[in-house]
Every structure is written in C-alpha cells, then in structure tokens.
Image (cartoon, grey):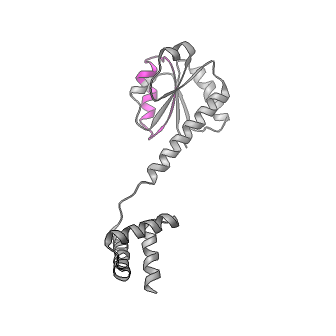
Amino acid sequence: MVQIIMVMPKSQDADSVRRILMKNGYANVFACSSGAKAVSLMHEFDDGIVISGYRMVDMMYSDVRADMPPGFQMLLLASKDALSAKQEQGIICLSMPLKVHELLDTLQMMTRGILRRRKKAGGKAKGRSEEERQIIREAKELLMTRNHMSEEEAHRYIQKCSMDSGTNLVETAQMVLAIHIK
C-alpha cells in the first residue's frame, strides 16, 4: 500500500481531499497543514506520494520538495497562474479548481509507478549462500566434463535455460544436476 501525505494550508481542504481519496480506496492518507509535519511524516516511510498545496503555513512546496526522501513523488495542487509561473522537474501538477477524476487518475498513475519501483527493487539479485554457489559450480563442472564446455559456456548455458524456463539460476542448476545424474 502506498502512503499519501497531504500538506495544504487549510486543514478543511486537506480533510475534504482525504475523504475523497479514502472513499475511492486509498487507505493510508495522512493530512497536515504544515510543511514541517509533512517532512516528519515522510521520514517515517520508505516511499509514497506527497500531495501539496503551493504555500503552507510554514513553507512553500519547493521547501517540502527539497526535504523529500528519494522514494517520494510530489503532486502539486495550485492555481493555473502559479503553475504557469513555476515548472519544476520531477513534480506532477494539477490546477485548481480540482477535478476529482483527474486527481484519481493522476494518483493511480503515480501509485503504479511506486509499486513498479518496489517490485523492481525487490527483484534485485541477492547474495547467494555458499550452498547455492556450490550447486551452480557443480552444474557447471558437470556440463564442462560431459559436454566439453568452457566454464563461461556452461555458465551461459545455465543462465539461458534459467531465462527460458523462468526459474532462478540455482533451480536451473539443480535441474541440470538431476537430469545428468540419472
């Protein structure tokens, strides 16, 4: 679930947007009126979305943006005049008055991006245990001996089989060992 932190100068505005989001399935929505509170909340999470007004009680949206941790994205809600005067990289903007469907569509797009990034980060190669390295080594040695491959060719063969079958390298090495030992 993606965390959404709303920081708007008027707490009633933040509460009304929060109600809209919660009504449409967004459960983790935090509302605040000060930039300092928003920054404090951001540092409690790994990633999320900050929905910000142009100017808060204690700081501008750009100050909040400057203190955002790397996993966060900002959605700026401001008047058309304010948006045309300031265009920054990495900030998604919606003009006021706000249209509910535009807000929901934009949040859905941003949420998908965060979830995709999470999935990608979770799929990064993790260090293999000594047992797993040994299984891969034995499979390569078997291929080198029986099929007269170099170590590099054996490794590439296991790697290609792994990609083709959709299994990880260790499982593929286990399959190579099981097939050739019989």
In the image, taking residue 23 as reference, residue 122 lies left or right, namely left
Q: Position of residue 101 (x, y in %)?
A: 67, 29
Kindly indicate the quadrant of the structure image that contains residue 35: top left
Kindly indicate the quadrant of the structure image that contains residue 106: top right
Q: Which residues are magenta?
A: 37-63
* Residue at the (54%, 12%) spot, across then down: 81
Q: Is residue 75 above or below residue 174?
A: above
Looking at the image, which residue sits at the far front?
Answer: 148
Instruction: Quarter of the image for the N terminus: give it.
Output: top right
In the image, taking residue 51 as reference, residue 159 lies left or right, namely left
* Residue at the (48%, 45%) spot, across then down: 117
Q: Position of residue 30 (x, y in %)?
A: 54, 32
Q: Is residue 76 above or below residue 130?
A: above
Q: Is residue 81 above or below residue 33?
A: above
For the residue pair 87 and 149, the one nearer the viewer reads as: 149
| In magenta segment, residue 45 | yes
Question: Is residue 124 something that shows in the picture?
Answer: yes
Question: Is residue 132 something that shows in the picture?
Answer: no
For the residue pair 73 and 148, the one nearer the viewer reads as: 148
Q: Position of residue 125 (x, y in %)?
A: 40, 57
Q: Position of residue 157 (x, y in %)?
A: 41, 70
* Residue at the (52%, 67%) spot, across then down: 165
* Residue at the (63%, 24%) spot, across then down: 16
